[in-house]
Amino acid sequence: MAWKNAVVSREEQKELKREALLREAAAAFNQHGYHATSLDDIANSLGVTKAALYYYYPNKQKLLAACLERLMETSFKGLSRAMAEGQNGREKIKLALEYYLLSLIDEMSCCVIVTEDDALLPEDHKEHIKVRDRYEQALRDLVREGIADGSIVPCDPKLVTLTFLGSVHWVPKWFSHDRQWSGKELAAMMSALLDRALSTAPVKSLLG
Amino acid sequence: MAWKNAVVSREEQKELKREALLREAAAAFNQHGYHATSLDDIANSLGVTKAALYYYYPNKQKLLAACLERLMETSFKGLSRAMAEGQNGREKIKLALEYYLLSLIDEMSCCVIVTEDDALLPEDHKEHIKVRDRYEQALRDLVREGIADGSIVPCDPKLVTLTFLGSVHWVPKWFSHDRQWSGKELAAMMSALLDRALSTAPVKSLLG
């Protein structure tokens, strides 16, 4: 490719701008809340006009939908990785939670917005719920796998999944990077804590 | 008292109306989301005028603040009960979570609104955060007590508390009474699951 990739094509440019936009939108939603953030705010902090934003997304709801879609993509990637790396159901669900936490905490992944799905347009909401349900079902299957292979105690996979997702989805409400733990530390600690609730061989200490 | 308490005083009347109003507001916020609910909606479903509502609360934010205040009162009552009934730190935190869940699930206690504290007016937000922090600190103290008395494994009380509150606060997002479990069942199952993450003598099964 010309210029040894130092220049990018028009299509790539557009994708890079879309990335920057989603990142900025997520950061703004996280900081001020979805309802309190306007497209003007986002355009201002990107240093572009609102018209430039409209080129990518017709309104704030579509921007939210794009953020959530991105988050679900990352979540499914983490799930695949967990399923490949874990040796049994328990390890797989623990890793899946850890990777999901990491993607939620990563600024790109639009954390606060997981609680804002009610604000989506009806058609996007329906689509999001479908994908989210598929993700939840996959987690329940890992719990079932763990019960079957003896790594997880008998339990209700639905209750477990919803309880754990609650812990994870609450993180954006209280976690910020300048606090006590890094995102990586938090993801490791929280997944270890939740894991202990299920494990047939629970660790004697959750420290260190 | 005249009429054997069949009639109530003007002050009692006012309190009963305030109760009905808070209950209705909570139900509406839960069903449609805080931002999507107007004072008109609430007045309509109570069959009163908006002017009648203004007698109690000057605006929607003040109504939200009153709902949250009520919730925190109930939470502290549950905490006292848990502290009186539990035999060690682990039992106390388990019961505190169970009672907190019950109060969240009870329609009076304004469940969805726990995630809407950002919408409070600055002075109410500050006050709410103060009370909420006091509640969190009390839960952390129970975890510390459990570590000290040997009923809870070594762990980070702050991480534990925030993780567990996440599970609990997520419930209003997915739980409704027409589902698989009653509120009482859910509160018992979820507190048992979270309890197992901490217990030095974890149960062999979470079923039955």
Image: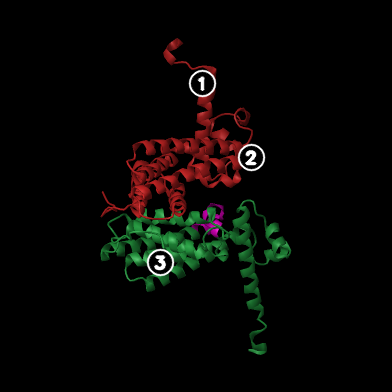
Chain colours: A red, B green
* Location of residue A34 in the rendering, given as x and y in whole percent from the top left corner: 56, 44
Is residue A70 placed above or below A16 in the rendered structure?
below
Write the residue at 39% across / 40% down. A99
Is residue B173 placed above or below B5 in the rendered structure?
above
Magenta-highlighted residues? B111-126
Q: Chain of mark 3?
A: B
Determine which residue is flagged by label 3: B95
Amino acid type of the residue that numbered disc 1 sits on in the rendered structure: Glu
Q: Bin the neighbour count of mark 1 within 10 Å (Cα to Cα): few under 14, some 14-19, many 20 and up.
A: few
Is residue B102 placed above or below A21 in the rendered structure?
below
Looking at the image, residue B101 sits to the left or right of residue A87; the answer is right
Q: Magenta span: helix, strand or loop, mainly?
A: helix
Quarter of the view holding residue A188: top left
- Which numbered disc covers residue A160? none
Write the residue at 40% across / 53% down. B163
* Location of residue B182 in the rendering, given as x and y in whole percent from the top left corner: 52, 63
Number of marks in picture: 3
Residue at the farthest front position = A148
Per the image, is B122 magenta?
A: yes
Element assignment for label 1: helix
- Earlier in the chain: of badge 1 and badge 2, it is 1
* Location of residue A83 in the rendering, given as x and y in whole percent from the top left corner: 38, 38
Determine which residue is flagged by label 2: A123
Quarter of the view holding residue A50: top right
Per the image, is B17 magenta?
A: no
Determine which residue is flagged by label 1: A12
Amino acid type of the residue that numbered disc 2 sits on in the rendered structure: Glu
Q: Which of labels 1 and 3 is toward the front?
A: 3
